[in-house]
Image (cartoon, rainbow, N blue to C red):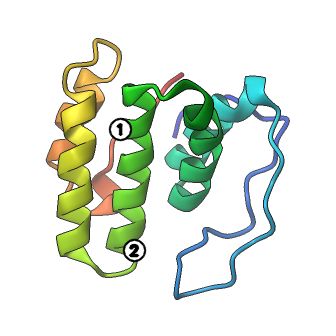
Amino acid sequence: MPGRFAPEIPLPSYGFVPGRNERPAERELPTDAAFAYGVDCWNAGYYWEAHEAWETLWIESRDPVLQGLIQCAAACVKLLQGNRDAFERVRTRALARLVESQDYGDFAAAFASVDDLDDRPLLRT
């Protein structure tokens, strides 16, 4: 795993998976650290938390690349829930947003072949 990009914000003590464990309290993130913290969460396997961090930024920007990353995280949550069909559907939508991106095209290509979360590509800021 690459080094942390927002080391000043501690990672969660567990990854939330709806239907499996208790949802943690909402975390207030500084806007300037939200993207980096989301990357840290993704790289550590905290997909719900990555989704939540990025969504705060997406609500303001409506950036399609950010939406694609959020959907990648949501797809991973679906896989953790054991719902492979939903994983495939959400991943397809995510890849459509990311594949054209100059910055995330390689990530999209790698995520397209993910069959197991242990094989997921890591992100860099």
Residue extending furthest toward the top:
102
As drawn, the label of residue 80 is 2
Q: Residue at x 43, y 52 (%)?
A: 73
Q: Is residue 11 left or right of residue 86?
A: right
Mark 1, residue position? 68
Amino acid type at image mark 2? Leu
The one of 56 and 83 positioned closer to us in this rendering? 56
| Image quadrant where one finds the C terminus | top right
Amino acid type at image mark 1? Gly
Whether the residues at callouts 1 and 2 have beta carbons within 8 Å, the answer is no
As drawn, the label of residue 111 is none
Q: Residues within 10 Å of mark 2 (few under 14, many from 20)?
A: some
Judge whether 42 appears above or below 76 on screen: above
Q: Residue at x 62, y 56 (%)?
A: 49
Judge whether 107 appears above or below 11 on screen: above
Q: Residue at x 36, y 48 (%)?
A: 72
Judge whether 9 appears above or below 125 on screen: below
- Residue 9 picture quarter: top right
x, y percent for residue 45:
51, 57
Q: Taking the image as drawn, is residue 122 in sight?
A: no
Mark 1 or 2, which is nearer the eye?
1
- Residue 38 picture quarter: top right
